Image (cartoon, rainbow, N blue to C red):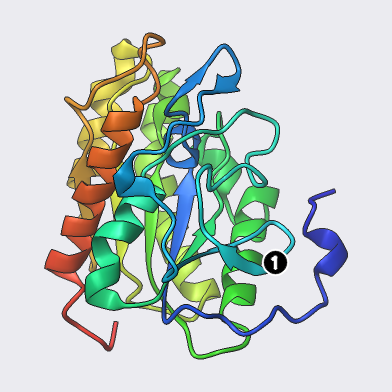
Amino acid sequence: MDSSDSTHNSTPPPSPAKDIFILSGQSNMAGRGGVVNKHWDGVVPPQCSPHPSIHRFSADLNWVPASEPLHADIDSKKVCGVGPGMSFANAVKDVVGEVGLVPCAVGGTAIAEWARGCHLYENMIKRAKKAVESGDGRIRAMLWYQGESDTLSKHCVDAYKVKMEKLIDNVRQDLALPHLPIIQVAIASGEHKYMEKIREIQKAIDLENVVCVDAKGLELKEDNLHLTTEACVELGQMLAHAYLTHFGSNPSM
């Protein structure tokens, strides 16, 4: 049972955040920066430091001060470290004001596990709805980094475009936000036979208010799968730039 199920019917305290962002996908969004041999080194770069205007929606559906590792109580079966979320929040806070992060990413998950009706998807939607249930905060965008698990077979590759576009459509429908900005990351790692195929699909998705940030070229750890701490910082800043450039000046979003 998800740790948030016991408070499913409770009302969270008012959101201190005006601008709320969903963080979702798999391990590189959850954060593996600084994790070596199943242990996080505890190093937090200044770009990822806590700040009074940055908040996190916890697994038990409460707003708390945000700090690394953001996904420790969400991707709880793995060891989490630095991800792109705090770097993103610090880069946008001076423009948008109070920032709320809703971590939802879980490592090792394929796009099929994020279909409507599946636990990961339904938990993400539940958390997003609870995050705005009280207070005057608004969900401004979903940041999505996923796809490495879908590079393992041609079958997964062939189904990816339809499943990703359906995910976007379902999220917008279920949150009643038909124009919700989606900033997805084109993967930087995965099974090399199909990695470029997934990347091509991600970069070619042509839907309203969907933009792509390319992670290729960012430094990978020795496992050649996960981003280093420094790369997570850089990716967070790239995501922030994409948000502010494409959506940050439109308060009606």
Q: Which residue lies furthest to the left in this view?
A: 245
**Residue at 41% of width from left, 38% of height from top?**
44
Taking 100 as reference, is 138 above or below it? below
Q: Is residue 5 above or below residue 132?
A: above
In the image, is 21 to the left or to the right of 106? left
Q: Residues within 10 Å of mark 1 (few under 14, many from 20)?
A: many
The residue at the point 59 percent across, 74 percent down is 131
Tell me, yes or no, if residue 207 can be seen here: no
Q: Quadrant of residue 54?
A: bottom left
Identify the residue at horizontal 47%, vertical 29% (top origin).
32
Q: What residue type is labelled 1?
A: Leu
> Residue 10 placed where, x, y %?
81, 78
In the image shown, does 3 or 176 lie closer to the viewer? 3
Q: Quickly name the residue at label 1.
A: 61
Q: Quadrant of residue 252?
A: bottom left
**Residue 217 as seen in the image, left or right of residue 82:** left
